[in-house]
Amino acid sequence: MRLKTAVTRRRLLASASLTLLAPAAPRIARAQQAQWVYKYANNLPETHPMNTRAREMAAAIKQETNGRFELQIFPNSQLGSDTDTLSARLSICQRRNTDHDFGVAD
């Protein structure tokens, strides 16, 4: 049993545009990725003015850097308690001071 598919102008234009845009897809996907991604965590509720302003700041930074820098906001201790985030920060600082492959000059 053979299905007949009518070739309409809409289908022809849709397939032609997909064929032309397919090679550009990897470049479009790369352009949307941030070069630097930073995380900002705190223990305040999401509706707190500090987090509201932080989200506004993150959006402005992303726009001004054309998406190269992304600041992610994590309120409500989503990444852990204050002690957890401080110990994570400390371990990163220690690694920067001891690991020469980290890219930080002494």
Image: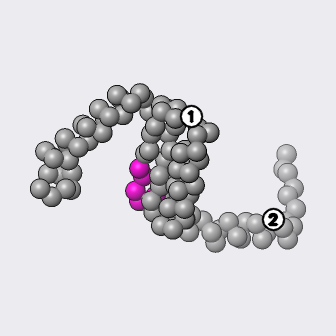
Please name the residue shown 62% across and 39% down the image: 47
Callout 1 amino acid: Pro
Q: Write down the region rendered in magenta.
A: 34-38
Residue 69 position in % (x across, y down): 45, 59
Query: Which of the 4 image quarters holds residue 104?
Result: bottom left
Identify the coloring: one colour
Residue 81 can be seen in this image: yes
Above or below: residue 34 compared with residue 13 = above
Between the C-alphas of marks 2 and 1, the distance is 50 Å
Amino acid type at circle 2 is: Arg
Q: Is residue 81 left or right of residue 49?
A: left
Q: Is residue 4 magenta?
A: no
Mark identifier at residue 82 = none
* Circle on res. 45: 1
Residue denoted by label 2: 11
Residue 61 pos. (x, y %): 50, 61
